[in-house]
Image (tube, grey):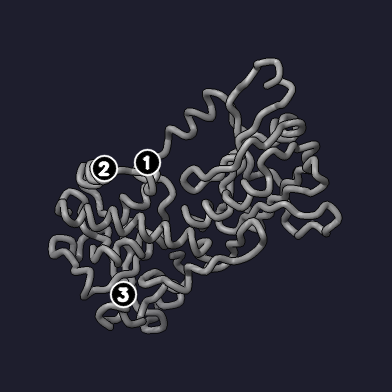
Amino acid sequence: MPELPEVETLARGLQRELAGRRMLSVELGKTDFMDNPAEIERELPGTQIQRVERYGKFMLLRLQRPAAAAEGVVQESALLVHLGMTGTMMPRPANEPRAKHTHLVALLDDGRELRYIDPRRFGRIALLAGEKLREELLRFGADPLQISLEEFGKRVRGRRARIKGMLLDQGVLRGVGNIYADESLWKARIHPARIGTRLSVEEIKTLHLALQQILEKAIVLRGSSISDFLDAEGEPGEYQLHHKAYGREGKACYRCKTLIRRIVVAGRSSFFCPNCQKTPRSTKRRRGMKPVPRRGTSKGAAKVASQKG
């Protein structure tokens, strides 16, 4: 599922392509993942895309009606887009055949079409305005690229929860997912099952820096394309070539050559180095940290292999 770097990459590309463009008409395909399809179909035509920005794992297409703005009637509104596992959004020439699973097509005033494609439809699209938009955005925590060290420390050390789970909690930090949580914890040498309140001040400082450095580098490399992610030009990212922990079970740690292991923490697969990221004794054999058998080493290997990372 696209995380902060992938969504930031796509949002920047769409900002270059769409800022100032007006949507003339809208066609919808399957709408089961849309909050309010009838409203989208009715209200989007005639709106101008002021800017495209990332908000956590969401994209926001900030909208305005030129006629209403000229009359001094301005209401904050946005098309909120979550890509799910297989979604992508990009402008294409109107005469180009539409890909299968194209579920939203907006005709732009330059003759192109803005298309949302999502084979599995695990994403979300909603047209929100005014108080509904503000309430939606207030559900999420701080942006990890903007949060101060002091605030980061308060959020992490203020809860008796495993650090991996806190990094994934969108109410704590918005935008971090499984890939970049594992990568940041590996860089900071912190075991994913450590309890937030037990991290030292120095560990908090190290993790805060590691998280921001990992995210910034991933953005430069246009995110990680594990399976389906493509940017606004239809190109895959490159950061998956630089993963140090995520998806590397059974491979040598880049620091110490110990084999990377995979366990389940907070319900998610977690990749870590058992030598560099020491297992806290108090968490061994407790609920919430389950060892995962190596693929192909037991009768349950096929089931384990089907688990989502």
Contact check, label 1 and label 2, Cβ < 8 Å? yes
Left or right relative to 80: residue 55: left
Q: Secondary structure at mark 2?
A: helix
Q: Secondary structure at mark 3?
A: strand
Tag 3: amino acid: Arg
Distance from disc 3 to disc 2, alpha carbons, whole Å, reads 28 Å
Disc 2 marks a residue whose amino acid type is Arg
Query: Closer to the N terminus: mark 1 or mark 3?
Result: 1
Q: Going 72% across and 52% down the picture, which residue do you hit?
A: 91
Q: The C terminus lies in which quarter of the figure?
A: bottom left
Q: Which label's residue is closer to the chain start, 1 or 2?
A: 1
- For label 3, count other residues whose C-alpha is less than 10 Å away and answer few (under 14), some (14-19) or many (20+): many
Count of numbered circles on the image: 3
Q: Residue at x 21, y 42 (%)?
A: 158
Q: List the single residue furthest toward the right.
A: 95
Q: Do we see residue 86 in this rendering?
A: yes
Q: Residues within 10 Å of mark 2 (few under 14, many from 20)?
A: some
The residue at 41%/45% (across/down) is 174
Left or right: residue 303 compared with residue 16: left
Q: Residue at x 55, y 55 (%)?
A: 9
- Please state the horizontal and vertical placement of residue 85, each as a whole percent of the image: 56, 57
- What numbered label is drawn on residue 56? none
SS state under label 1? loop
Specify the amino acid type for callout 1: Ala
Q: Position of residue 295 (x, y in %)?
A: 40, 79
Q: Residues within 10 Å of mark 1 (few under 14, many from 20)?
A: many
Is residue 233 left or right of 277 when viewed as pictured?
right
Q: What mark, if any, has residue 155 been given in the picture? A: 2
Measured in 3D between alpha carbons, the distance from the residue under mark 1 to the one under mark 3, in whole angstroms, is 30 Å
Residue wearing tag 1: 142
- Image location (x, y in percent) of residue 6: 52, 57
Residue wearing tag 3: 261
